[in-house]
Image (cartoon, coloured by chain):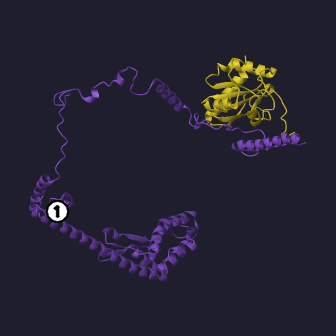
Chain colours: A yellow, B purple
Amino acid sequence: MSFLLPKLTSKKEVDQAIKSTAEKVLVLRFGRDEDPVCLQLDDILSKTSSDLSKMAAIYLVDVDRTPVYTHYFDISYIPSTVFFFNGQHMKVDYGSPDHTKFVGSFKTKQDFIDLIEVIYRGAMRGKLIVQSPIDPKNIPKYDLLYQDI
Amino acid sequence: MAPAQRCPLCRQTFFCGRGHVYSRKHQRQLKAALERLLPQVEAARKAVRAAQVERYVPEHERRCWCLCCGCEVRKHLSHGNLTVLHGGLLEHLASPEHKKATNRFWWENKAEFQMKEKFLISPQDYARFKKSMVKGLDTYEEKEDEVIKEMAAQIREVEHSRQELVRSVLEPQAVADPEDGSSALGGWKGTNSLVASTSQQPSSVDLPPTPELDWMETGQPLTFIGHQDTPGIGNIHSGATPPWMVQDEEHSSVNQQIGPSYEEFLKEKEKQKLKKLPPDRVGANFDHSSSTSVGWLPSFGRVWNNGRRWQSRHQFKTEAAARNKQQSHREKKPSVS
């Protein structure tokens, strides 16, 4: 499952991925391979990756290996998925407090596919923030930790 | 009802008596008429300061209709060969009859009081205009003098070059120095058109052939670089293969292709596809192949940042520096104690 998707292990590799993905949504899953929720998410990602191959490029990033990005992206819950397009970060309003990343796993494959499509269309129109098509019931709930507590 | 009256401004008959003047239609007509007249007056007013004197041209016979007096007035003042622009109109505007007529017009048509001043020229302004007119005349005269002087200088130059040409023709032996020859020829070429156009056609026809023969005979002799006659290799006359058709030893392999290689062709195809994408998509001008430093961070709108998205990187870097400082501080402490 997670061995089907390409992995990034250093900051340099992540930079390389961000810079080199052209005209496709870049999906970076931050988490640990052993974590159960991550396993769920990785399952969905790998099963949909071939269908979305023309719209998205999916990579898995280990949070312990890239501390810089873990701090920069404020990853406090895993798995967290961050979306990029042409080197620019895409924000998505899921109805949750954090718009910069998707926290948790998706309920169905279709949710993920829909989300990718919405992000792709928004990016093609020049929008940096899009509205998520996923039903708010299916979005995992979490508490956003206040900074420095 | 009131008697039938004709309003010349609206060009209509009305029965309202004095009320017509206050109607919307009349005021509109009035405004339009005044707007038509205003630019002329403004142009004339500008001429008060800087009167322009020009040479007379039939266009200066134009007349302008003065709305208040109800008469045609000559716009420009001309005398003999010269014209002062807007002189006529200014003269009319400064006259007392025009002032009376303007007052009557304003009263009868109930126009705006402030506008009236714009259409009048005071006698002081007229005096100022007269002064600037005199100045303008002076400058015009000076300009004319200058032009005449320039023309005289030109004619003198032409004469001079012609004299030189005649001299050079009469002394063929002295023209051995190439510099002299080329300058005489340069002068000859330049003045050839003038010479032909001004006068003396037969003499100009005579002059060209003789200097040409001179130049061909007494010019610098050509440098001789030897007979190009190698017995083995043929040349163009013997019909040998031209050098560019001869196969070079290195390029005889089949791998050498002319034009772009296959990879370049594929890249071109990709670029064509890119052109079809919408130009205002996110990151359209993102340079994918630019090399970035080790500390590069992508543009990320962080969760806890104050300020705009592109400042989040900066904020992160300052926070990271502060955290590192704190950490090194903490590390130092146990070693001290």
Q: Is residue A147 above or below residue A54?
A: below
Residue B298: which quarter of the image?
Answer: top right
Residue at the image position 28 percent from the left and 29 percent from the top: B244
Observer able to see residue B171:
yes
Residue at the image position 21 percent from the left and 71 percent from the top: B156
Residue at the image position 78 percent from the left and 32 percent from the top: A75
Left or right for B7, reference B199:
right
Label 1 marks a residue whose chain is B
- Amino acid type at circle 1 is Val
Q: Where's the C terminus of chain B, which quadrant?
A: top right
**Which residue position is annotated with label 1?**
B195
Residue at the image position 74 percent from the left and 35 percent from the top: A68
Foreground residue among B292 and A35: B292
Label 1 sits on a secondary structure element that is helix
Q: Position of residue B302 (x, y in %)?
A: 75, 39
Give neighbour class at mark 1: few <14, some 14-19, many 20+ (Cα, 10 Å).
some
Q: Position of residue B107 (x, y in %)?
A: 55, 75
Foreground residue among B101 and B149: B149
